[in-house]
Image (cartoon, rainbow, N blue to C red):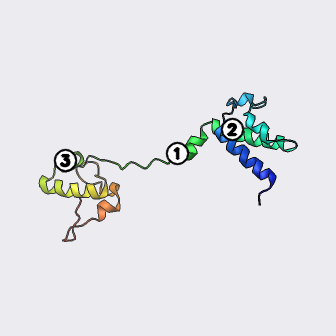
Amino acid sequence: MYSEMAIRVTVAVLLLLFSVAKVSCDPQNDGEMIHVSQALHVFTRGEERGLMHDIVVRISKYFSKGRLLLALAPAPSPQPSQINCKGLCNHRCSLHSRPKICLRACGTCCVRCKCVPPGTFGNRELCGKCYTDMTTHGNKTKCP
């Protein structure tokens, strides 16, 4: 069972969400009297008025600083990194003795591992285990 105070707090918070409150966002004015919607005064009487006023003022400050929008906004999904496999592989295979085979293997490795090592030779470890451990059916390293 709800106590009378819990009901008052709930009603005041609900009314606060639907009413417009005038709250200072300036930290220098925090000590001054803050004007709150008349709904607060209707639902608070007696000893609880100070407590209710403090609760409503804190909630109003929290919402007025835009934190409500941040709390309700969904987190943005990470964007998949798009790399230019064709351009990177063209550079990687530019000095290779068999450029067409190199381009095909490099393109496959780029799509699977999302990486092409810098330069025309070596540096394979910079792309991690995916790039260095990929092998052909003959158990030779696949990625140039």
Q: Earlier in the sequence, mark 1 or mark 2?
A: 2
Q: Quadrant of the image for the N terminus?
A: bottom right
Q: Gap between marks 1 and 3, in whole Å?
A: 42 Å
Residue type at the position of mark 3: Asn
Residue type at the position of mark 1: Ala
Q: Nearer the viewer, mark 1 or mark 3?
A: 1
**Foreground residue, 72 or 46?**
46
Q: Gap between marks 1 and 2, in whole Å?
A: 19 Å
Residue denoted by label 1: 73
Is residue 144 in view?
Answer: no
Check disc 1 and report its element: helix, strand or loop. Answer: loop
Residue 52 lies left or right of residue 135; in this view the side is right
- Residue 86 location in percent, x, y? 21, 48
Residue 74 lies left or right of residue 87; in this view the side is right
Residue depicted at 66% across the width and 33% down the height? 20
- Residue 93 location in percent, x, y? 18, 50
Residue denoted by label 3: 90
Residue denoted by label 2: 60
Q: Nearer the viewer, mark 3 or mark 2?
A: 2
Q: Earlier in the sequence, mark 3 or mark 2?
A: 2
Residue 96 lies left or right of residue 16; in this view the side is left
Residue 11 lies left or right of residue 78; in this view the side is right
- Residue 65 location in percent, x, y? 63, 36
Mark 3 neighbour class, 10 Å CA radius: few under 14, some 14 to 19, many 20 or more: some
Check disc 2 and report its element: helix, strand or loop. Answer: helix
- Residue 61 location in percent, x, y? 68, 37
Mark 1 neighbour class, 10 Å CA radius: few under 14, some 14 to 19, many 20 or more: few
Measured along the vertical axis of the image, is residue 65 above or below residue 84?
above
Residue type at the position of mark 2: Ser
> Residue lying furthest bottom in this view?
138
Measured along the vertical axis of the image, is residue 73 above or below residue 19?
below
Check disc 3 and report its element: helix, strand or loop. Answer: helix
